[in-house]
Amino acid sequence: SSFYHFQLFIFLNVVFIPNINAKGVIMKAFEQYRLKTCIDYKPWSGEENYISVFKGNGCFSSVGNRHVGKQALSIGAGCDRIATIEHEFLHALGFWHEQSRSDRDDYVTIMWDRISEGREHNFNKYNDTTSSNLNVPYDYGSMMHYSKTAFRNGTEPTIVTKIPAFSDVIGQRMEFSDSDLLKLNRLYHCTRGSTFLDTCDFEQENICGMIQGHDDKADWKRVSMATGGPDTDYSNMGQCTGRGYFMHFSTINGNGGDTAMLESRLLYPKRGYQCLQFFHYHSGNPSDQLAIWVREYDEANPNGTLRFLQQINGPPEDLWQLHHVTLNVSKKFRVVFVGTKGSGSSTGGLSLDDVNLSETTCPDHVWRIKNFKSVMENTTVGTAIYSPRFQSKYGYTFQMGLYPNGSEDSLGELGAYAHLTSGDDGVDAGLTWPCPWKQMTMMLMDQNADIRRRMSNQRSVTTDPTVMVEEMLFWDDPRKVGMEVAESDGTRYFRGPGQGTSVYLTQARALTRDFIKGGDAIFLLTMEGEEHYTTATTTTTTASPHDPCATVTCENDGVCVKDSAAQAVCRCAAGGDWWNYGDRCQFKSSTQDNMVTTVVASVVIFAAMLVVTVVSVVCLKKKHRRKMNELGGSVIIKNMSVKS
């Protein structure tokens, strides 16, 4: 990371991004920064230094705060991917590429002869006077690391990992890695995410500060397995000895109507809206119920007031089900899980695991694909499977098309596409067609127990009502531009054309992390309107401060920086036994040069001393000869004696 970084609030001026989809993805990237760090982004309102986002020729950014006023960051064509945007803003926040670390040669080998001509500078290495690794080990999984094929001039890799197993790990563009976040939070002295509230996998006996309710008849208990199921928790799926706990309310005994209340610790909201996410296992009677409440506190109600939010419905099933509940709380509060025993007999109960709470919006819909590895292996190349149709809050109906085994031109890749579909005739008749500016996001969820550590993979598509395909408006009513679909249950509807990518995620990466858990993959699908990606802009102007580096060129890969006196200084590159020096790094030296210089200097000094000695002797002889001539040769040299 660079030594020159922004303050915790980054001021932005989004000046020219005609790609509405990119705006929406930028907003999603900022939400990840807020969730996982203390860094926030705010519209520019005349601050001296700020980032100006524009659509340039590609994706690029300066490294660190250059203190030049307006600092450009380009999100060009093809850059509208959340990890790409997070990557560029990490540059602006002070991060070099991972393979530019001073210790990179211990972990990777740069194959210089395989790099495209003119692209060699992308593989520069910077010493620890220019950047710091913040005492974090080299990270093959960093989103700041190039892939093995970066800027290659043929088919051979330009970066070879010293540990072969990481060859296909480098270059990931899914999300921040753990080490990315560790460095970023150290650099900016973050102790927690701005919008993060709580997470709990119940591995610790203190159950994350949760408490049992006082007005109930039963308790939730921390267990590693339960009669009637589940046999394992969801966090570890029984794979870790000595771990794997969850909370369980048994409904085998007791009376109908008995309740068990599990309350979170006290929480202090900032935004006024939150998303509660958790996994729930139902092994009891169909009449057993789980409900979500909040207990809100204020001066008038110091003991809190209970407010009902949502009933969790569904029959008993041998499955940990994912649930989302939207909260709209602005006071100090607790989340309250209320389990209620039904009227019938039970052989199990209700269970909870992997609870996460953040001040973010909840996804709209969940598509779970069981036995996903088998689906990837056994689906014919070029064949798509489709999610159920989901109706958005705007009335439009949509679905996701997934190519589990790729296509002919993208073998080994998952393909993902968003489609509008026909819905209820009466509803569709009242909608605006073509569908204007709705962003559909398709996220493959990394099912890590802690939401902050997830590296979920997502792509977004926005409906542009002006786009034409074969003389048809692409996002028009699917009845006009789509094809009729007949489902196996007899349902018929129209599916419009799809937009997305054939390289959503490699099958190899889909098998990593927790993309598949308990055999299943989970996709989170959302449709959002213009209110999501409309960001405040301003016309406030401020004079750009002078950049002292603007007229300074540092040679030999030197980097110009501004010192504490606001003067331009070149920081010169150096290696293990060599270094550049000079006010512009124009000179180069090494330990071998120093040895030669030392020897030469010694010889010169010896010769000079010898000359001085000879001259001195000659001068003394002449002086004494002259004196003796004056005295007539009667000078007597006496011995000196000392009395005892």
Image: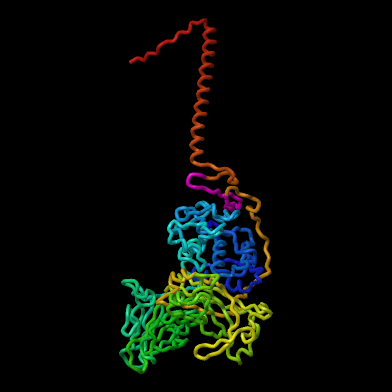
- Residue 189 seen anywhere in this rendered image of the structure: no
Foreground residue, 330 or 516? Answer: 516
State the residue at coordinates (56%, 77%): 417
Determine whether, in the image, residue 460 is placed left or right of residue 265: right
Percent x, y of residue 371:
42, 78
Residue 517 lies in the magenta stretch: no
Residue 445 placement, left or right of 233: right
Q: Is residue 260 above or below residue 644?
A: below
Quadrant location of the C terminus?
top left
Of residues 56 and 358, the one nearer the viewer is: 56
In the image, what residue occupies the spot 49% across and 70% down? Answer: 412
Residue 555 seen in render: yes
Q: Foreground: 616 or 347?
A: 347
What span is in magenta? 557-578
From this view, report whether residue 574 is shown above or below residue 379: above
Task: Say which quarter of the image contains residue 337.
Answer: bottom left
The total number of labels drawn is: 0
Residue 218 spot, x, y in % from top left? 33, 87
Query: x and y percent of residue 419 in the render?
Result: 58, 80
Q: Does the magenta stretch include residue 571?
A: yes
Residue at 51%, 61% in the rendered image: 147
Tell me how the rendering is colored: rainbow
